[in-house]
Image (cartoon, helix red, strand yellow):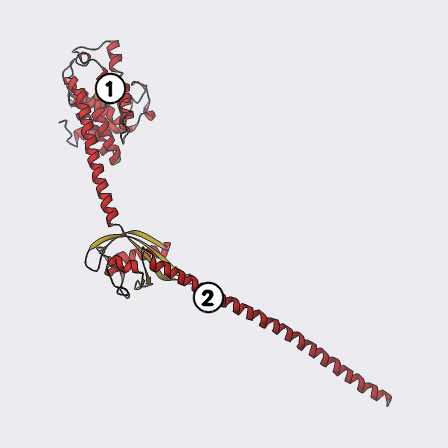
Amino acid sequence: MKKIKKDRMGKEVEKLQKRIAELKKLETDCRKSESKCKRSEAECRKSESECKRLEKERERLLRIIENTKAAIFITSYDGTIIYTNPAMDELFGYQKGELLGEKPSAFSTSPDPVKFMKDTMRILEKEGYWEGAVPNRKKDGTKFTTYVRKSVLKDNKGAITNFLITENDITEHNHVKDQLKESLNKLEDVLEETIRAMALTIEKRDIFTAGHQRRVAELAFTIAKAINLSKDKVKGVYMAGLLHDIGKISIPAELLMKPAILNEIELKLIRNHPQTAYDILKEIEFPWPIATIALQHHERMNGSGYPNGLTSKNIILESRILAVADVVEAMSSARPYRPALGVDKALEEISSKKGLLYDSDVVDTCVKLFKEGGFKFK
Ligand SMILES: [Fe+2]
Ligand SMILES: [Fe+2]
């Protein structure tokens, strides 16, 4: 009897212990979900304040875009205008909202606006940014040019959704640029006239070499062009040609016109003219290395020239061109001590010393110009 009672009590205790364990688990679960609730409540509050912050930020940005002087508009992916700021409407002469639904090709005067859009789109997709000058038309038909900057706007998966475009009127800027270019051209003309006047000064003292510098300049210019020197270097060669013998100003006129072969002392005096030319020309700030070109025009490839006995790699190309043009012109014309030898003899001379005294490419080009290009001294 006692044993039966004991067994029943044992079972009751077991049941109670199980129940207690269940209640404890329930209590733990409750605590856990209570803390979860608290956490998500905090997260909710946090994201709500983040939403408010973002909204304020959006309003602030919109205020900036609306008030900026820079013309801004946004298009959808297919190029339809979905937003314009007041500066954009004002720049193109439209009322607020009038441009919405239009495409930029409506006011672009590019020869092929559709192709232009496709080309810029390709760059935008690849690089995310495009900029350049675009010809446009205002609502009243006035044509003008803007400098356009386009960038892409993406969603959080990285796909392009919109394009943000800014437009800057550069009509005035282009006008100033044109005026500046015109002034520079005028200045260059004045400089050329001044150089010609300087060249004439020296030629007035020496009637035998009158016109020598001009003819050398013309041949050197034509050679420089034929060997594809840049436009600027070709101009430099021409200007240096006009002045290369200016150093002769320090040589007595009687010596320059002496109808006999010169003695050693006289030759030394004459051979000083490239250095004198350099000393005069280095004082003037030319946009080309005229002083150096003149200094090296009697240098020779094998180092036998003067005044510094430079060898090929140390003689600038412009001087190597001038050297050939100088010899060809001098031999083709009469000198106080000899009659003109003629162009054929001059070409024979430079060809026979090709690579030794004169630059091979320059000689080949010069010979070709006379024999095939129809070049003639005027
Ligand atoms: Fe010379
Ligand atoms: Fe010369």
Above or below, 178 against 90 in this view is above
Crowding near the residue tagged with mark 1, few <14, some 14–19, many ≥20 C-alpha atoms within 10 Å: many
Name the one closer to the observer, 125 or 81.
81
Q: Position of residue 295 (x, y in %)?
A: 28, 22
Crowding near the residue tagged with mark 2, few <14, some 14–19, many ≥20 C-alpha atoms within 10 Å: few
**Picture quadrant where residue 103 is located:** bottom left
Above or below, 272 against 161 in this view is above
Q: Position of residue 87 (x, y in %)?
A: 29, 58
Name the one closer to the observer, 285 or 295.
285
At mark 1, the secondary structure is: helix
**Residue beneath label 2, please?**
52
Name the one closer to the observer, 130 or 168.
168
Image quarter (top left, top right, bottom left or bottom right) of the C terminus: top left
Looking at the picture, which amino acid does disc 2 mark?
Lys
**Picture quadrant where residue 196 is located:** top left
Image quarter (top left, top right, bottom left or bottom right) of the N terminus: bottom right
**Residue beneath label 1, please?**
247
